[in-house]
Each structure stands twice: as C-alpha cells, then as structure tokens.
Amino acid sequence: MTGPARYEIEHVTRYAYTSPVRDSVMSLRLKPRGERPERLLRFELTSDPPGSFTESRGAFGNTRHLLTVHREHAALAITARSRVEVSPAPPLPKALAPDAWEQMCPWADSFADWEFTHESAYARPSPLLEEFCRREDLAGPTGDPLGALTALSGALHRAFRYVPGSTSAVSPIEHVLESGVGVCQDYAHVMIAIARSWGVPSRYVSGYLHAADPPERPTQSDAGHAWVECRLPGPGWVAFDPTNPGLPRERYVRVAVGRDYADVSPARGVYRGWASTELAVAVTVTPL
C-alpha cells in the first residue's frame, strides 16, 4: 500500500453579465468533505467583488456556503482553494457474502436508504433505459453484488463516448442513451438509475479527480468530476467511476454527495438585473 497523496486544488467560477447587476445570492458547494480516507488541511473561499459568506451543513452532510454581493457588478469571480490529503482506501474483498443480495432486500424500504434506493430527478427509470439494459444485457444483477456493479461500471464505460460539452449539467439520461455520447454526470446518472433498479442504495458524488499522466503533473479542466457510490453489506459505500474505471481511489477528492446532480451543484444563484450571463469554470488539481 502506498502512502497518502496530497493535492492543492483551485476552483475558479467566473460570471460575466451583459449589463451591471446587483444583489447576487449564490449557493456554493465547493468545500471538500474531509471524511476518511480524506483529510482537509486547508480551505479558503473568496469572491471578486468581495461579498459575505455564511456556512451551513445540508441534509446529506455537504457544506454549503451562501455568498451575497449587494454592490453593483458586471462580473463575479468565486475562487475556492483547498489542500487535501487522501490516504489509500482499504482493499475491497474479492466477493461479498453469499447472501449479500438478501441482506440488501430490506434496504429499499428503510428510512435511512430511501433517498438512494428510489428515483430522483436525473436518475430515474425510462423506456430508453429499459431498452438500453436489454441491449447491453444489464436487465438484472447476476452473481456477486460487488462484481455485478464493477461489471456495470465497465459496461457503461464501453457503451458511451466521453465528449466534453456534449450535454449540460441538467441533461436527462435520455440524451446520452440516444446519442451514446456524454460527460461524467451522464455516466453517473445512468449507473445510479440501473443500480437502484437492482435494489442497491446508490448516490451521486461530486468532487475532483487527478487524472494527469504522469501523476506528478497537474490536472486542469473546465469542471469538477462526478462518480457513483453504492452501499454494500460489509464494505459500506464503495466508489465506482464509469467514466474512468481502474484509477486508484486516492486520486479522487469528494466534495458533496446526493441523489443526483441537483443536490450537489457547485454553484447556483440569482441576481437583480436585466442581464444574460456567461459562465466559465477553471479547475486545477496539483499534486504536492
């Protein structure tokens, strides 16, 4: 087992308005959760023009910052800087207990797992999803749950083609199912919908991925990353990334979890004024 990895993360969100606006109110989910095997060493959040921040904790344990900027402004830049240490996760078993599927049966009706076993806005059943599952031989789970979910993640990676900008953050799963192209949140939404149909509690994870090769180089992108966690008897919540299967888990930094993207959006808000908006995001993950 290797030692922990440390990352410096800068996430810059820029809004440009076609005419000056005022009274911007932004809801932000940009602070890493810092749960084992991760440790949050430092976090800083700033805005230009300066505003006031208030911090709270949401229903799924995510940190939310509320930013208010009352002065008139033609642009708004929000910068989150984090330093995180990620330790290697304990190795997973080769297989779960023989009765693992039976152990999960009551979870679909339990209060604790209800949000992650039933459909949500972007992870839901549809005729196209049923057709896709039949075509890809994913109509039902077979064998060991851990092996079935690993195979599902790999099947989605092979079935779809990753094309940046091909969908938006709020695209329905029908888009990727029809076109075969999408981005990480599409892969995650489809996997969650299928896993929930199998009775597996599944949640959407937003955060950062250090995907550079060689690994000592920084990773730069115009967005964060999204993947899936499924709760299994024994190991608990296990991460699956259908976009990038096989990467070591210490390359991932978790920021927020939820039913789907709607629960973990990094930034959303309102302002007072008659202006349209252009959005630009820059994320840099630098290994230390």
Image: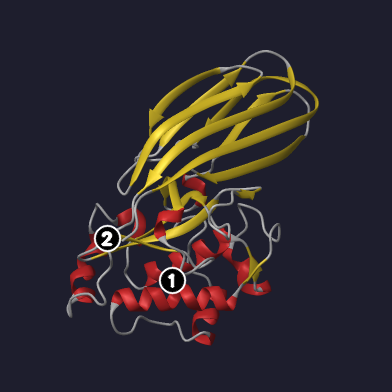
Q: Disc number at residue 194? A: 1
Q: Position of residue 28 (x, y in %)?
A: 52, 33
Q: How many marks?
A: 2
Whether 49 is drawn above or below 100: the answer is: above
Q: Give the residue furthest to the top.
A: 71
Q: Given the image, on which type of amino acid does mark 1 rest?
A: Ile
Left or right: 180, with 232 as reference point? right
Left or right: 10, with 72 as reference point? left
Choose between 242 and 81: the one closer to the eye: 81
Which SS class for mark 1? helix
Whether 89 is drawn above or below 132: the answer is: above
Residue at mark 2: 90
In which quarter of the view is residue 10 placed? top right
Q: Position of residue 219 (x, y in %)?
A: 59, 51
Q: Given the image, on which type of amino acid does mark 2 rest?
A: Pro
Q: Which mark sits nearer the N-terminus, 1 or 2?
A: 2
Choose between 276 and 4: the one closer to the eye: 4
Which SS class for mark 2? loop
Please give the name of the residue rendered at 58% of the width and 51% of the height, measured from the top-left corner. Answer: 217
Q: Position of residue 132 (x, y in %)?
A: 54, 80
| Category of crowding for the residue at label 2, using alpha-carbon neighbours closer than 10 angstroms: few (below 14), some (14–19), many (at least 20) | few
Whether 226 is drawn above or below 75: the answer is: below
Q: Position of residue 275 (x, y in %)?
A: 78, 29
Choose between 28 and 94: the one closer to the eye: 94
Please give the name of the residue rendered at 72% of the width and 15% of the height, measured from the top-left corner. Answer: 72
Front disc: 1 or 2: 2
Please give the name of the residue rendered at 55% of the width and 57% of the height, measured from the top-left corner. Answer: 211
Is the residue under label 2 in contact with that under label 1 (CB below 8 Å)?
A: no
| Category of crowding for the residue at label 1, using alpha-carbon neighbours closer than 10 angstroms: few (below 14), some (14–19), many (at least 20) | many
In which quarter of the view is residue 114 placed? bottom left
Please give the name of the residue rendered at 62% of the width and 68% of the height, measured from the top-left corner. Answer: 176
